[in-house]
Amino acid sequence: MTNIFSIGNDKDLPLSDIYDSLKKSTYAVLRGIVDPNLIKQSVASIKSSFSPDNDNPSTGESPSEIMSNFQKLATGGENNRYNNFPRFFRTLYNPIWSDNIYGMRDTFRKVSRVRNLLYGLPKDFAIEAIADNGYWTASRIHQYPAGGGFFIGHRDTTLLDVAKEKGTGFFQVIIVMSKKGEDFDSGGAFIDGSNGERLNIDDSVELGDIVVYDGQTFHGVEDIDPHRKLTLNTINGRLAGFVSLYKKMD
């Protein structure tokens, strides 16, 4: 696939080619920056340390809570609350400055630098601390459980302010942490292609790949293994990592 780029490290990013792929195909895949073996180790840590007793409600957390290690089930989405699209997944917030309980710190740092380069920001912007303008890296993992985990098709809004400030495109950056056909069988992340066709990204990616897509692209996650019995006391199904820039709120 022409939109899969094999890259040795974040210094070798072919930015113009990536931007061109985003325009033509609405997404790009960066392979070789993240070691898939480190992802396997992190997933094993997540599974071994997980407790459903740590789940918090879908809403009501304070801004300060998600700026530390924090776990919640994200469900619902029919009350018209801002940015509250219908969904069913678990979020494990794991900021880079928090205890490295999943072994994801180095991976989050690497991918945050990729994000910054794509945005034209300083390489280490908002990674180790809150930036002067209030932005910080909300590094986290989403688990879409087997038995029906999903995220309805939508367009992102969270990073629009960052894009406007820099006069750049609006990108989302995702770390592939599970493999379709091994960790789950059906469903997966999708986007609408440039011709309006639905593309299932999980059909073509590998562990450790970094998926970049235009935030204005319609995307979501189709039901993960709805034929299986739902269990919420283990980590299963589809996993994905995020390094989104959030604005600090008091």
Image: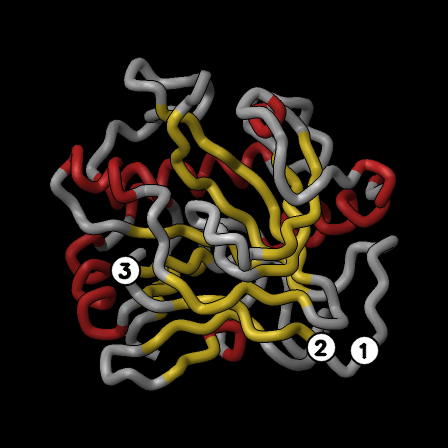
Q: Alpha-carbon neighbours of circle 3 within 10 Å: few (<14), some, or many (≥20)? A: some
- Location of residue 232 in the rendering, given as x and y in whole percent from the top left corner: 83, 57
Classify residue 214 by image quadrant: bottom left
Side (left or right) of 116 relative to 146: left
Residue depicted at 31% across the width and 56% down the height: 215
Q: Label 3, on which residue?
A: 216
Q: Secondary structure at mark 3?
A: loop
- Location of residue 231 in the rendering, given as x and y in whole percent from the top left corner: 85, 63
- What amino acid is labelled 2 in the image? Asp
In depth, the one of 10 and 198 nearer the eye is 198
Q: Label 1, on which residue?
A: 228
- Location of residue 177 in the rendering, given as x and y in whole percent from the top left corner: 61, 57
Q: Alpha-carbon neighbours of circle 2 within 10 Å: few (<14), some, or many (≥20)? A: many
Pointers 2 and 3 in contact (CB under 8 A)?
Answer: no
Q: How is the image coloured?
A: secondary structure
Q: Earlier in the sequence, mark 2 or mark 3?
A: 3
Pointers 1 and 2 in contact (CB under 8 A)?
Answer: yes
Q: Label 2, on which residue?
A: 225
